[in-house]
């Protein structure tokens, strides 16, 4: 990872087949392994050592889209485990597990390291980014107690502009934090590891106007009427005890994580289309109809006559006055995630029969607040909490908040697991595992200020929930032909919890959705050849996915989750190779071919009416790209490829020049099911840009990285030049068809207002200089 300048988890997809890490424009990332993609709880488990990390659910329960970024300085290794990890790891994962194993304190010597860089982006207009990482290890009591501290500061150059507000390099993100680990070894057979981690990142949403780029060549512009700042802060505390009890090793692990993700995003178009006054400079046409025809009119009149709304008349004119007061509507959404975990394992691997038994418990509290209020028309900064109402009375002309609601979402999971491996012979081993799980979901929501237009009313705290239990199984066998060739086969099961929707206006009978699960069948070879000068690993797998959770949106604006009426099948081949043909040269190639498709037709739950396509402003309906049998699963590139080359040239006894190059490729992928329907309904892109299938296709792309440097004593110190995304490739990881979106702001082009397409993409080319030194 050091040689390839991989400093955070987002870059791991450059080296692991079948792994995608897609940045979310509102903060956090979605991790995808083997094209297992869906909204809801995370499909890939993420760990710091033995501590599972979680995203925040938000209003749409999509915790899988907000998984935290992981810092990769002073780590022992990163593990990317493909396929379900259901019977050993604490929190069961359906698609795979990503573990970051930190270097532990050394108890017998001092050491330290520093790593810094200056860089600039191809689109940052010459501004500089800087990054510094540091580590120090101190043995407090020789061979008994040691402490290791790591700190970092990262300020990126930024490359996103806002031409409407006159802002440049808005996403010059600032990240800082660190971790402290302590190891106590009171006896030869007892080790206690303690860890505290703090991470903080401040930035902005990174989506940008792709249509503007297509028509004018201007890249990375976010022409919105408001700013979209973000903050992602995480605190983590953990302790792990390992006690070798002769007959087995006891492991006891506990952790507490406190994460706050808060961001703001633009909802102006959805609400301003009902305003008779123009707050948007003509980007949204003013409403000219009757106030009584605005959605939510009856609920407004009821609240107004009941005294909950004052300062206006309880009729169509009064409702129009209320709606006009919302201004350019910006959503502020702070989300907190407080999770505690406890795990106990007893394991022995010293005999022909190796076994593990354990118990796991976690309790997660997600708290989300959604506040809709105007933004300052000059600065684009949200006016919160200015004009916030007091008590239970909303005063029109004084109060301007268009929505205030809270969601208290709690998930408790318990599990017991056991796994055993029997070495039948020196060559043949078989493994079996079982896991019993039980989860309970309880969600309490309240609407303090209703959004009449969105179809909801005032609501006192209301609790709904559900629970499930079941078992997961694992079977595997491996055969070692010799020390260099091993064949293995496995059948493993994984699941993730269901939940409770809290979507504005959604019928109550659609509130609950169930867990989904997969069976993964896999066979592979792990081999080494020519005295390990060639290493080749290859596998083939099939995943059968049932009751899969899929996303839809109510009134074409508010996301919810339902269970698919169709199963899916994902099958493919993965490989990774390493070649060491001559001294000081290493070549690595890995990749995957994965085909992910539905095995039947999808549909909405009974009683929910589909919205028309194209959407015509109808209310009380749901939008879902209901897939047909054989449809590819969205965000599923069939091909991925990763290659790298490393070489060094000695120039003295202890100095050498090192060279590194890497290439990462992913093929095209769709963003929707049922492409023929949407390509037909939207045959034209905005202002003559490509329409049809292009509006729902992420083109394939490749990125190239280079690094060259001077090193002393194989990394005692070094100075390097590097370039990431050397050819400045625009690799799209998300694409939104603006014409089909009820929340996308218009954009003025050649005197006309059009609905542009927005994307999230890979960062542009970054070049820089890096220095590194180690002390011992």
Image (cartoon, rainbow, N blue to C red):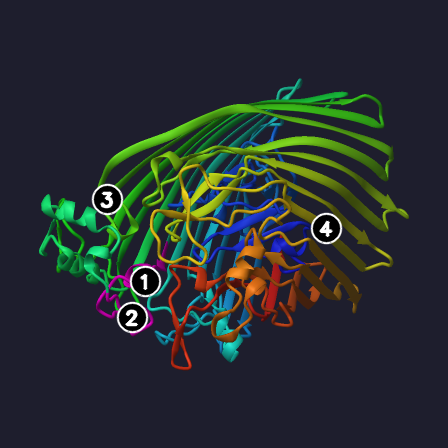
Find disc 4 in the rendering and name its residue. 593
Residue at x 17%, y 56% (from the top left corner): 319
Q: Is residue 518 magenta?
A: no
Q: Residue 268 bears which disc, if any?
A: 1
Residue 616 position, x and y percent, is 38, 58
| Local secondary structure at mark 4 | strand
Q: CA distance from mark 1 to mark 2?
A: 8 Å
- Which image quadrant: the N terminus? bottom right
Residue 319 visible in image: yes
Find disc 3 in the rendering and name its residue. 457
- Cβ–Cβ under 8 Å for marks 1 and 2: yes
Outermost residue on the bottom side: it is 750
Q: Earlier in the sequence, mark 3 or mark 2?
A: 2
Q: CA distance from mark 4 to mark 2?
A: 47 Å
In magenta, the rendered stretch is 263-288
Q: Is residue 283 magenta?
A: yes
């Amino acid at each position: 990872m050091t040689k390839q300048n991989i400093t955070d988890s987002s870059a791991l997809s450059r080296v692991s087949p079948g792994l995608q890490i897609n940045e979310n424009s509102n903060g956090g990332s979605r991790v995808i392994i083997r094209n297992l993609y869906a909204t809801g709880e995370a499909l890939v488990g993420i760990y710091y050592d033995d501590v599972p990390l979680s995203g925040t659910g938000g209003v749409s329960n999509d915790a899988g889209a907000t998984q935290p970024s992981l810092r990769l300085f002073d780590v022992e290794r990163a593990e990317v485990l493909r396929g379900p990890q259901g019977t050993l790891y604490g929190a069961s994962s359906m698609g795979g597990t990503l573990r970051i194993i930190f270097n532990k304190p050394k108890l017998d010597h001092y050491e330290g390291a520093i790593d810094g860089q200056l860089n600039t982006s191809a689109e940052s207009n010459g501004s500089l980014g800087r990054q510094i990482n540091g580590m120090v290890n101190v043995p407090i009591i020789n061979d008994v107690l040691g402490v290791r501290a790591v700190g970092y500061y990262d300020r990126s150059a930024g490359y996103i502009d806002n031409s409407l507000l006159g802002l440049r390099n808005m996403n010059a993100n600032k990240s800082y934090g660190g971790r402290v680990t302590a190891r106590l070894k009171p006896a030869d057979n007892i080790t206690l590891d303690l860890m505290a981690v703090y991470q903080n990142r401040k930035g902005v949403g990174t989506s940008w106007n792709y249509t503007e780029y297509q028509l004018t060549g201007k890249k990375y512009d976010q022409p919105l009427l408001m700013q979209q700042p973000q903050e992602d802060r995480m605190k983590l505390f953990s302790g792990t005890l390992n006690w070798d009890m002769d007959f087995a090793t006891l492991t006891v692990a506990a952790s507490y994580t406190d994460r706050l993700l808060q961001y703001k995003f633009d909802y102006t178009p959805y609400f301003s289309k009902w305003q008779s006054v123009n707050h948007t400079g003509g980007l949204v046409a003013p409403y000219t109809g009757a106030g009584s025809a605005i959605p939510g009119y009856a609920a407004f009149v009821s609240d107004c006559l009941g005294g909950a709304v004052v300062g206006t008349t309880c009729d169509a004119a009064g409702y129009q006055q209320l709606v006009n007061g919302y201004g350019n509507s910006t959503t502020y959404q702070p989300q907190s995630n407080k999770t505690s975990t406890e795990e106990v394992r007893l394991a022995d691997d010293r005999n022909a029969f190796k076994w593990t038994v354990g118990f796991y418990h976690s309790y997660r509290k997600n708290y989300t607040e959604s506040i809709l209020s105007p933004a300052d028309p000059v600065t684009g900064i949200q006016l919160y909490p200015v004009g916030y109402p007091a008590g239970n009375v909303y005063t029109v002309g004084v109060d301007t908040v268009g929505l205030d609601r809270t969601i208290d979402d709690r998930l408790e999971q318990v599990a017991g697991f056991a796994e055993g491996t029997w070495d039948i012979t020196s060559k043949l081993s078989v493994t079996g595992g079982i896991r019993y799980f039980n989860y309970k979901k309880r969600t309490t929501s309240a609407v303090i200020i209703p959004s009449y237009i969105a179809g909801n009313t005032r609501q006192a705290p209301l609790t709904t929930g559900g629970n499930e239990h079941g078992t997961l199984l694992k079977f595997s066998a491996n055969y070692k032909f010799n020390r260099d060739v091993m064949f293995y086969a496995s059948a493993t099961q994984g699941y993730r919890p269901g939940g409770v929707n809290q979507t504005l206006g959604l019928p109550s009978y659609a509130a609950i959705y169930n867990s989904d699960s997969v069976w993964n069948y896999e066979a592979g070879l792990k081999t080494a050849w020519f005295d390990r000068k060639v290493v080749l690993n290859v596998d083939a797998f099939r995943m059968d996915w049932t009751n899969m959770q899929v996303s839809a949106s109510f009134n074409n604006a508010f996301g919810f989750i339902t269970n698919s009426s169709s199963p899916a099948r994902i099958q493919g081949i993965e490989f990774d190779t390493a070649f060491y043909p001559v001294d000081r040269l290493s070549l690595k190639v890995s990749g995957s071919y994965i085909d992910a498709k539905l095995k039947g037709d999808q549909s909405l739950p009974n009683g929910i009416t589909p919205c028309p396509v194209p959407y015509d402003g109808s209310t009380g309906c749901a939008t879902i790209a209901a897939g047909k049998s054989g449809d590819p699963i969205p965000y599923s590139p069939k091909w991925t490829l990763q290659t790298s080359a490393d070489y060094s040239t000695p120039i003295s006894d202890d100095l050498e020049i090192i060279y590194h190059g890497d290439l990462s490729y992913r093929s095209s992928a769709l963003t929707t099911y049922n492409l023929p329907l949407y390509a037909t309904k939207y045959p034209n892109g905005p202002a003559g840009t490509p329409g049809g299938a292009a509006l729902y296709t992420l083109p394939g792309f490749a990125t190239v990285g280079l690094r060259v440097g001077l090193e002393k004593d194989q990394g005692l110190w070094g100075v390097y030049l590097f370039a990431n995304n050397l050819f400045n490739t625009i690799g799209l990881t998300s694409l939104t068809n603006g014409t089909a979106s009820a929340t996308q702001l218009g954009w003025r082009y050649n005197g006309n207002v059009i609905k542009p397409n927005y994307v999230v993409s890979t960062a542009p080319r970054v070049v820089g200089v890096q220095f590194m030194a180690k002390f011992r």
